[in-house]
Image (cartoon, grey):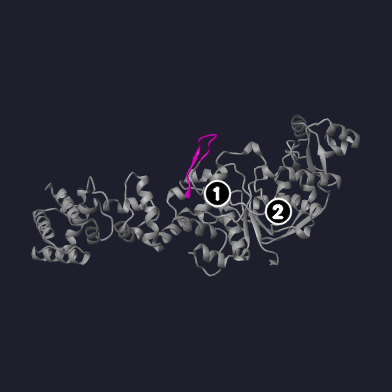
Amino acid sequence: MNTEKKVRVRFAPSPTGGLHLGGVRTVLFNYLFAKHYGGDFILRIEDTDQTRFVAGAEEYIFECLKWCGIEPDESALHSGPYAPYRQSERKPIYKGYADKLVEAGHAYYAFDTPAELEEMRSRFKTDENPSPQYNHLLREKMRNSLTLGNEETQRLLAEGTAHVIRIKMPVDEEIKFTDMIRGEVSFQSSQTDDKVLLKADGMPTYHLAVVVDDYLMKITHAFRGEEWLPSAPVHVLLWKYLFGLENMPQWAHLPLILKPDGNGKLNKRDGERLGFPVFAMNWTDPRTNEFTQGFREKGFLPGAFVNMLALLGWNDGTGQEIFTLNELVEKFSMERVHKGGAKFDYEKAKWFNHEWIKNSGAEDLADKVVAAFADKGISVTKDKKLEKVVALVKERCTLLPDFVQQAGFFFQAPVEPDISAIKPKWDEKKQLFFAELIRTLELSTLWEHEDLEKSFKELAATQQLKPGDLMLPLRIMLVGGKFGPGVFDIAAIIGKEETIHRIKYVLGLL
């Protein structure tokens, strides 16, 4: 692969809504590739279609990337030598390139009104062609500079008549390029319509803007989803006409992230239907108030989320599944990206998160656990006690909110212990044992796991009871249910006074 120039890649989202995990994976692959080769990752906002602009969407994109730890080197937020990084702020740049294409005969002015375009789609509709396009066949039947002649065209332009500039697609020409994932890809030019390059408001469409900006920002590699493949012939021609194909970035069209059953592209409706997030973070559409849940708020660690995404369509060939971001940077290569789509498996996504929680230090998890408790209205302090609790229960937690269920009893006594679980086998001997246990604990000067277990078993032996028959009642007293880590670990952490208080509460001694 040619990396003689400094590698420069870009992600160019439109600020139109929440960030789908497919978009985050595109960011990630761009980032990993750039950092692997010591290059730059640029974020450019594609906001040329102002009708689709959504307030807050741009800020949301930046927050998502910050959470994931894959922030750009250059952007509207981070600045850089090729500013501005919002296409709406680059509007004056594009017209000159569109005019250049017209002058060279590669594009033309089109004066068709919306009503005339609609009439064209209706008039030329057939069973064989149910959706007529503005292409090499129909452009000769429309109101444009190809049919009106130079004098009429100049008159309309001078009068300020609304118009767009369209690319003039050649007839029966093979257009090809080499994709880093798919190899050589070719298209027949006649099968592509004459896309609009410059709109009536002077704003460029994506097709013109992406080519001009990639050139001016010295982008060396462009990675995007495979849904952009149909646009490739237009972009190849624009590179050829404006800047020369030798200056075109190397392209890679990434495979789709598929629904869990593999039948089509994953979308947010699938998440709603099947009960899992498909956005990186929570998003509420300000226009409709429609809410979409995100992986962050669901309880995923950013490292686990990034790790999971990396393996949707890529692997390093060794079978390794758990990677830090630095390891991904070191091992990533476009050659290992799959051509076929990758099925999204939410259970596998949760497995990644569980592994990351297990492998994370208690101190690193503490802030996130505090936040998880706060979401449930429980105030917990980040201290050594919390770190002990986190270390004790983290292997039982798949998502961050699980810490509340698995560790809540360390900070709040159970209100309604599940005594139904111990009632059938409860008898006077057990009642007497726990009454004596209270006296033993009150006299105890040692309060570590080992000491508590030893005195518990010695007392059971003197009363000729099996410790195993007494462990569940003690767990119910301390925890409230049949779950949690070792009971003596729990008692050691909640302390002497609280342990005794909880036993008394269940025995009815308070």
Could you say which disc has been placed on residue 62 in the image?
A: 1
Marks 1/2: CA–CA distance:
20 Å
Chief SS of the magenta region = loop
Could you say which disc has been placed on residue 446 in the image?
A: none
Q: Amino acid at mark 1?
A: Phe
Query: Between disc 1 and disc 2, whose residue precedes?
Result: 1
> Picture quarter containing residue 485?
bottom left
Please name the residue that numbered disc 2 is placed on.
214
The single residue placed furthest to the bottom in the displayed view is 318
- CB under 8 Å between callouts 1 and 2? no
Task: Kindly tell me whether residue 327 is visible in this rendering.
Answer: yes
**Quarter occupied by the N terminus:** bottom right
> Picture quarter containing residue 406?
bottom left
Q: Residue at x 83, y 48 (%)?
A: 170
Which segment did they paint magenta?
A: 284-295
Tally the marks: 2
Specify whether 346 is left or right of 10: left
Secondary structure under the numbered disc 2 in the rendered image = helix
User: Does 506 lie within the magenta span?
Assistant: no
Task: Kindly tell me whether residue 19 is visible in this rendering.
Answer: no
Is disc 1 surrounded by few (<14), some (14 to 19) or many (20+) residues within 10 Å?
A: some
Q: Amino acid at mark 2?
A: Asp
Q: Nearer the viewer, residue 502 or 483?
A: 502
Residue 472 at x, y = what percent?
21, 57
Is disc 2 surrounded by few (<14), some (14 to 19) or many (20+) residues within 10 Å?
A: many
Specify whether 416 is left or right of 97: left
> Picture quarter containing residue 316?
bottom right
Specify whether 426 is left or right of 54: left
Q: Residue at x 24, y 48 (%)?
A: 414
